[in-house]
Amino acid sequence: RARMCSKARAREVSTLSCQKTLSSAKEMPAKKGTKRQVEAATPVAKKSKADATFEGVAEAIQQAVDIPEVVRMMLLAGLPDGLGTPSDERHELQTGIVSMIGQVVLGVQAKLQEGVDAEATKVGGADGRRAELGELLAKAEAGLDAAAQDAQAQAAAHAAAEAAAEAAAAKLAESQEAQRAGDAALEQAQQSKARLEMGLNVHLRGIVEADQCEQHHQALLPLLQELALDQSLMSALPSVCAKQPSGRGAFDAMVLEQLGKILGEKVAELAKFVDEAAPAAQQRAAAVAEAQVGAEAATASRASAAAALEASTLAE
């Protein structure tokens, strides 16, 4: 035992606390030998027991890199005697060695626990980040689904707006065609009425008053031909125009009167037709105006739907 203490003290020469411990242990009288102390004094048996029993403690001491190597070597050397001796049989040196070993082991255990805690924190952070990314992914997928649904809805709305615009355009064209066809007869009647009124009030009066009679006769002649008048009236009119009012006879007056009556009746007939056709013409005009408004609104809706569809497609 004296040789073991001397060897440990030589290894711990750089550590003041170990020197004091070893010095006090050297001065302390050894206890009377027991059977267990005799067995511990056998080097081969002690080595084998330390290897088998204290392997974990030795490994912990080896991991205590924050203490000098010479101290670790001292603790490893004193490990079998210290822990291999019952606590009530240890002398002061062994008790000190065991205490130091306990402190080292606790320190190593604390460092290992710190490492475990750090790794657990990392794992927890990774799990938290994974959960956060999972939420973001779920939101992104939900956003994509919503965008896809919106795009489908916008596509359906655009198709409906396109169909509505085409229907409105067709309705406008139909109402415009109805107006054109319905107003054609009215416009023709209005034009004929205006020409007959001109013939009656201007040209026939000019003939009656013999004011530029031949000129009025030539202007009136096409209109009379369109009316398919009696040939006798058409033939008598030139001779009437050649006379002054004072030189005309009863036949001449009858010719002019008959022409005035025919023209007046035709004007009255056309005026009645125009009056009766006016309400229908107004209805056709109102239908065209309404169809025009509808077509413009449908065109605007189609443009809006197209813009919305484009925006939803880009978002998708």
Image (cartoon, rainbow, N blue to C red):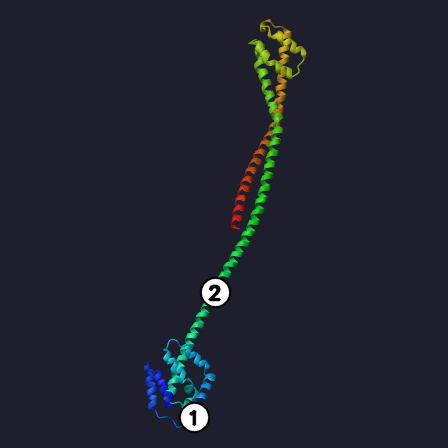
Task: Say above or below: 281 vs 64.
Answer: above
- Lateral position of residue 80 relative to residue 207, left or right: left
Instruction: State the quadrant of the N terminus.
Output: bottom left
- Marks 1 and 2, Cα distance to the nearest angstrom? 60 Å
Report helix, strand or loop for mark 1: helix
Looking at the picture, how far across and down is residue 68, in whole percent?
A: 36, 78
Residue 128's disc number: 2
Direction top: furthest residue: 247
Against 116, is 76 above or below? below
Viewer-proximal residue, 217 or 32?
Answer: 32
Of residue 261 and residue 35, the one placed in the foreground of this image is 35
Q: Secondary structure at mark 2?
A: helix
Q: At 50% across and 59% down in the image, what residue appears?
A: 136
Which of pointers 1 and 2 indicates the residue nearer the eye?
1
Q: Earlier in the sequence, mark 1 or mark 2?
A: 1
The residue that disc 1 covers is: 38
Quarter where residue 288 is shown = top right
Residue sitting at 59 percent across and 22 percent down? 191
Q: Which image quarter: residue 237?
A: top right
Query: Which percent across, then down, holds residue 59?
Result: 44, 79
Foreground: 119 or 149? 119
Residue type at the position of mark 1: Val
Other residues around mark 1 within 10 Å, as few (<14) / some (14–19) / many (≥20): few
Q: Nearer the viewer, residue 67 or 189?
A: 67
Using residue 58 as the reference point, say whether residue 233 is left or right of it. Answer: right
Amino acid type, mark 2: Gly
